[in-house]
Image (tube, rainbow, N blue to C red):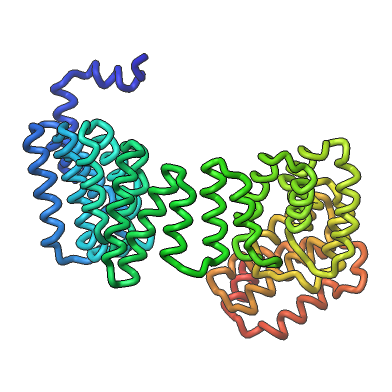
Amino acid sequence: MIDSRKQKLMDLGADTLADALLKLAVHSDEADDLIERLIATPKENIQRFKRKLAGLKRRRRFIGWRESAGFARELEMLLQDLKAGVNDPVTGMELVAAFYQADDTIFEMCDDSSGHIGDVFRYNARELFVDYASRCPDKEKVADIILKVNQKDDYGIRDTLIECASECLPEEVIRTMIAKLQKRADKEKNKYGKRHHLMLMESLARQIKDAKLFEKARIASWGKLSTAALIDIARVYLESGDVETAHSWLKKIPEGETYQEYKRDKLLEEIYRRQGNSEELTKLLYQRFRSFHTTDTLQALLDLIGNDKRDEVIADEVTHILKSDRLRESDAEFLIAIGKMDEAEAYLLGRADQLNGNHYHSLLSLAEAMESDNRHLVTTLIYRSLLISILERGYTKAYPHGIRYLKKLDKLSGLVADWKDFDNHEAFKEQIIQAHGRKRSFWSRYEVKK
């Protein structure tokens, strides 16, 4: 079914649309480029691609990060010229390879801290290469182009083509690539160059699910294995279907190691599930729930042990949370999420001295939840911590927020029936005036807005 706007445009006729496009092209380089691509022959589009790519090397103006998104669109249009002009798979692959090999020119002329430029290589160029490579009957040619591009990778972007090898190559060709990379590594004298080839081998080994080869390459690359390496090796064994060997690699991680703990535990969870080891899986999920209380970690545990245990588990954990002397904002959020508002209020009041206004994202959500349930004292204490943080840092850009917090405190002061052992609003206000009264830009704006 044709989109209604498309139909209306078609009804306008070719002359009207052509005039509109030409007028638009006067004000838009992208529109002008699109018109040139549409009216060019395939051969002309190839020449446009080559001309633009060569033109990049002659540029002298540096492109800052604010302009990087526009430059990324320019590179995307360059690849569109290639897509429109080339149907032959080998020619297409070779020209995409030329784009990757221009990485030094492209990245040296811009600030890509935003990641926009890198994404053109990781997604647009990759997708175009895979399209050509998948249609190419000469798979050895595809492999040769990938390996040629990856002889070096100074900007960490060319291995994108290695990572997509399994999408366009059969296993036997990939194994031939691995053998060639092994020869390169054996001949390489520089340890970083050697590691580069071995890392490419790792990627290919993982793609064909050859865990033993992955393990061999990782050990050859790094020697002594770190926790991250142990987890990576275990993951590849698990992906290849060897559950027990994957488990054995995770057991090599020293007890008490917390680095990449989340990744390790996710692998353990999958291992226990495949092993049918409900006892260890229960321990793991309970440990995860206790280390980070959320409704998601709670439900993951209940899905295993049964939802009928919900009240029992929650009761135990609420007791455990309230016994802890240390404030964890995530625990307060959890208590609120499960409807334990009295407990959440008591938890926050008992640890009010630990409220850190620098954690404004989590504290704001806590303040809003407490205020919506008419918990005025604890709401006041949270807003005080947020205000003090802004004043102590002298962060003038945040003064409008601080003024809003102080005005909120002015209103809340009349709603607090019992201040308990905390200073009332007048005493608190006097304290911050004494400590920060010289911050005239804050107080002048507060008085104006009051």
| Residue closest to the eye, 142 or 432 | 142
The answer to whether residue 288 is visible is yes
x then y, percent, for residue 52: 13, 50
In the displayed structure, does residue 327 sit left or right of residue 35? right
In the displayed structure, does residue 298 sit left or right of residue 67? right
Say which residue appears at 80% left-offset and 69% top-offset: 326
In the displayed structure, does residue 267 sit left or right of residue 28? right
Q: Quadrant of residue 433?
A: bottom right
x then y, percent, for residue 51: 9, 49
| Residue closest to the eye, 155 or 183 | 183
Relative to 42, is 193 above or below? below
Relative to 118, is 91 above or below? above
Say which residue appears at 16% left-offset and 45% top-offset: 95
| Residue closest to the eye, 373 or 106 | 106
* Viewport quadrant of the N terminus: top left
* Viewport quadrant of the C terminus: bottom right
Say which residue appears at 73% left-offset and 47% top-offset: 297
The answer to whether residue 369 is visible is no
x then y, percent, for residue 384: 74, 69
Q: Quadrant of residue 106?
A: bottom left
Please count the marks in the image. Answer: 0
x then y, percent, for residue 38: 15, 32
Say which residue appears at 33% left-offset and 43% top-offset: 174
